[in-house]
């Protein structure tokens, strides 16, 4: 099932994969002194707020102003306390925590997949966003990986708890929730919903996740909801995500600079979603596309491989067509693609493609140290980010086609399995009629 990649791992190649993982971990350590993006200033503000008002009070005072769930504050607060205990600066403490979660992510993925080479590849894909640029998306990574492992093992309650924790660190994984819900129901038609395992879904999936959510809400209060509303509220068409809305932003700057603002040194000038009806239509496009993907998933066979295919498709729909997506928001897609490559090695190119796309998006705006590119991305007064955004949109379309082709393959493979049973049934029925006819 897994192809040549797995055979290589079972032919005594484990030690080579282990050395690759060791090399990746050592290489990642060399980025600890990198400055990171200006997001680190936000982490310092969070920490200052919690030190002044306490963890709960700090989040209640500041949480509504930021699109971050409370567990991100918790982890940053713990990081600052640990840094003080060991006598290092706050920034160094944050970078050490990020590196620790980077190692935890690789350990979780290796424990799940038992594939050293794929784990090393995942590590390479995550270094820039985590240890180098100091994004805290890595904080959710071990929980999301272990949640997928638990679901693969049919441990629904454990999945629900881990997934809820991941969502309460960063909101982005919530995009995946409807896909998980449809997977639990296992129905492919409206009539099939009557036979869905509703009791198991409510007891083993919904209740544990709800318990975590209600518990966090009881502790941190209404700012948790306000933070989510902030994340879903007014936003730029694209916050440096190389996607369709980045192209649309560029187009509006070129054709209507008086209304939407001119290009800034040849680069897109931020346009807000709620500026007028033409920008607001982007929300309609996104929700229509997401609804279409969910309908396709509802009608698809509910295997774990198919789940991973549609999880990645759904998340890429958010990144490619959603408004307000940031340059680092491809991070969960890299994790999903890595798990998909584990489930079936035919998708290793998918993992490599989106890992590269995620890193290119980050590199184009922040280089490798969080400052800027050491050279201009302009080519003959043309912003190359526009070209890369167009490539990402093409990659998204290509992945959609791949998923649809896989569904046709599954449908064709199901027909031969059904025909013999139907033939046997017809044969028994014919024989019975003949016997009955002979008796008469």
Image (cartoon, rainbow, N blue to C red):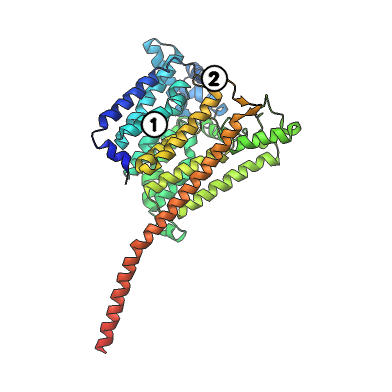
Residue at the (45%, 21%) spot, across then down: 132
Residue 390 left/right relative to 260: left
Q: Residues within 10 Å of mark 2 (few under 14, many from 20)?
A: some
| Residue behind mark 1 | 122
For residue 334, which quarter of the picture?
top left
| Residue behind mark 2 | 38
Q: How far separated are the C-alphas under marks 1 and 2?
A: 25 Å
How many numbered badges does the structure rendering display? 2
Residue 111, horizontal then vertical, whole percent = 30, 34
- Camera-nearest label, 1 or 2: 1
The correct choice, above or below, for 308 with respect to 234 in the image is below
Q: Residues within 10 Å of mark 1 (few under 14, many from 20)?
A: many
Residue at the (49%, 48%) spot, across then down: 401
Residue 73 visible in image: yes
Residue 226 left/right relative to 310: right
The correct choice, above or below, for 268 with respect to 372 in the image is below
Residue 155 visible in image: no
The correct choice, above or below, for 74 with respect to 389 in the image is above
Residue 179, horizontal then vertical, whole percent = 45, 46
The correct choice, above or below, for 347 with respect to 355 in the image is below
Q: Which of 270 and 388 is in front in this view?
A: 388
Residue at the (47%, 59%) spot, across then down: 190
Give the farthest residue toward the front: 380
For residue 87, which quarter of the picture?
top left
Residue 286, horizontal then vertical, whole percent = 58, 43
């Amino acid at each position: 099932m897994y192809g040549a990649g797995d055979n290589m791992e079972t032919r005594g190649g484990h030690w080579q994969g282990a050395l690759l993982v060791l090399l990746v971990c050592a290489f990642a350590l060399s980025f600890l002194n990198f400055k990171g993006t200006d997001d680190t200033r936000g982490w310092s503000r969070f920490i200052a707020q919690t030190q002044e008002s306490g963890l709960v009070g700090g989040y209640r005072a500041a949480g509504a102003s930021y699109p971050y769930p409370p567990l991100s504050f918790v982890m940053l607060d713990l990081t600052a306390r640990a840094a003080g205990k060991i006598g290092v600066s706050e920034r160094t403490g944050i970078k050490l925590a990020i590196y620790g979660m980077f190692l935890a992510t690789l350990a979780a993925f290796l424990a799940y997949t038992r594939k050293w080479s794929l784990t090393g590849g995942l590590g390479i894909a995550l270094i820039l966003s985590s240890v180098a640029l100091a994004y805290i998306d890595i904080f959710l990574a071990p929980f999301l990986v272990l949640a997928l492992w638990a679901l693969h093992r049919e441990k629904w309650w454990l999945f629900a708890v881990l997934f809820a924790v991941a969502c309460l660190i960063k909101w982005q994984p919530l995009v995946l929730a409807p896909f998980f819900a449809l997977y639990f129901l296992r129905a492919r038609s409206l009539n099939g919903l009557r036979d869905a395992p509703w009791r198991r879904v409510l007891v083993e999936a919904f209740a544990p996740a709800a318990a975590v959510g209600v518990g966090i809400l009881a502790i941190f209060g209404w700012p948790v909801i306000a933070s989510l509303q902030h994340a879903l509220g007014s936003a730029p068409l694209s916050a440096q995500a190389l996607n369709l809305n980045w192209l649309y932003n560029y187009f509006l700057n070129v054709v209507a600079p008086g209304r939407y603002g001119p290009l800034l040194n040849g680069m897109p000038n931020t346009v807000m979603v709620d500026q007028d009806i033409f920008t607001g239509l982007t929300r309609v496009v996104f929700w229509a596309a997401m609804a279409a993907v969910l309908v396709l998933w509802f009608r698809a066979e509910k295997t774990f491989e198919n789940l991973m295919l549609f999880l990645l498709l759904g998340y890429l729909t958010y990144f490619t067509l959603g408004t307000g997506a940031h340059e680092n928001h491809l991070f969960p897609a890299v994790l999903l693609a890595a798990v998909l490559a584990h489930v079936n090695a035919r998708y290793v190119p998918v993992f490599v493609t989106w890992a590269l796309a995620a890193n290119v998006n980050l590199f184009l705006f922040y280089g490798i140290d969080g400052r800027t590119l050491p050279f201009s991305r302009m080519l003959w007064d043309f912003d190359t980010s526009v070209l890369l955004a167009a490539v990402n949109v093409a990659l998204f379309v290509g992945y959609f086609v791949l998923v649809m082709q896989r569904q046709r393959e599954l449908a064709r493979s199901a027909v031969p399995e059904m025909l013999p049973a139907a033939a046997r049934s017809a044969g028994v029925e014919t024989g019975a009629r003949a016997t009955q006819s002979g008796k008469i």
